[in-house]
Amino acid sequence: MEAPVEKPNSRRSFLKSAGSLSISSLLGTAALMTMSDDARANMEWAEWFQGNYRLMSEEEKALARARLERRYSREYGKKVVVDGTPAQEGVLMGYALNIKKCIGCRRCAKACVEENNQSRGKDQEIEWIRVLKMEKGEFSQEKMNQGYPEGLGIQVGGNAYTPVGDVLEGEHYYQPDAVPEKDAAYMPIACMQCEKPPCVKVCPVRTTYREADGPVVIDYNWCIGCRMCMSACPYWARRFNWSDPNLPKEAMNPVTHYLGNRPRMKGVVEKCTFCIQRSRQGRYPACVEVCPTGARKFGNLLDPNSEVSRIIARKNVFRLKAELNTFPKFFYFMD
């Protein structure tokens, strides 16, 4: 009886024959084993053995982006650009959202999907933006006198608290006939781009990290799919690709960034990056640009004259779960 033959590209057979590889090559290649057969077939051998992106030389980074451009262009039948524009000196990206103006239309979530090449389809759709729909309510005077609204997890500038509900829960995949709905309040939530991100601390392969201009990014080629970052994130801001992403060729956005919206693969985590393919070119993130009420604001926190800085200086702002000392760069406010 013949012995069973292992598939040559299986994770087990690879690990058996990888004794002579360096740890860095082993981790990078093991991460890519989660990809589909079609995706692996389109890859060049050098992509299997490339190092962690932030540890590469500028020449190595350029070669890595060029490889991806060739692969994506073949896969999607169009010219794809993979940008590598680094963080700009003197810039710290920040976000502010007027929850009183949000009407719950969820255009931000849909624009984000289209801009950032997220998986489509009823069973496979991935959305980085969550819009909570909650019933309108008010805090009791007793809760306000306690100095902290129990269960809400938000802290407001000044001495007052904003009455947005007693708990940070609500329906976030609602399909209304018209918005805003009667007696409903809406609260969009996405990655808070923390100054001290707990997701970064727990990553065993250092594939996720905070960029100098603020966004927390992921090197998808090095993600091993352990999902420890998802467990550590207190904002439910990360998504995992359980299957091959469904990204139609005609819908694929060809203007990408290596650390941003380039197509992902099965078995990796992904998240919002403040649309660095846009923001590092002087443009607003897609969600800001599409908001019909102007509830979303974006700018440089280091510039006192930026729109975001003026809002923080003049409005009562709060950050979600501020007691965790993650120091989000995402602020909420009301007129």
Image (tube, helix red, strand yellow):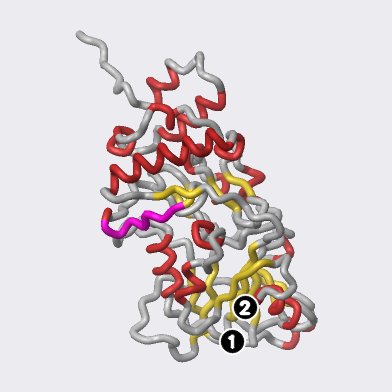
Name the element at disc 1: loop
Residue 280: image location, x then y, percent: 56, 59
Q: Identify the residue position indicated by label 2 in the image.
A: 166
**Is 267 included in the stretch rendered in magenta?**
no
Q: Identify the residue position indicated by label 1 in the image.
A: 137
> Taking 45 as reference, is 287 above or below it?
below
**Is 255 included in the stretch rendered in magenta?**
yes
User: Within 10 Å of the Cα at label 2, are there few (<14), some (14-19), or many (20+) other Cα atoms?
Assistant: some
- Taking the spot 40% from the left edge, 22% from the top edge, the residue there is 14
Residue 101: image location, x then y, percent: 54, 85
Name the element at disc 2: loop
Tag 2: amino acid: Asp
Left or right placement of residue 283 versus residue 127 in this view? right
Q: Can residue 236 be spotted in the picture?
A: no
> Taking 144 as reference, is 154 above or below it?
above
User: Which quadrant of the structure image shows residue 2?
Assistant: top left
Residue 118: image location, x then y, percent: 39, 57
Tag 1: amino acid: Gly
User: Which quadrant of the structure image shows residue 322?
Assistant: bottom right
Residues shaded magenta: 250-256
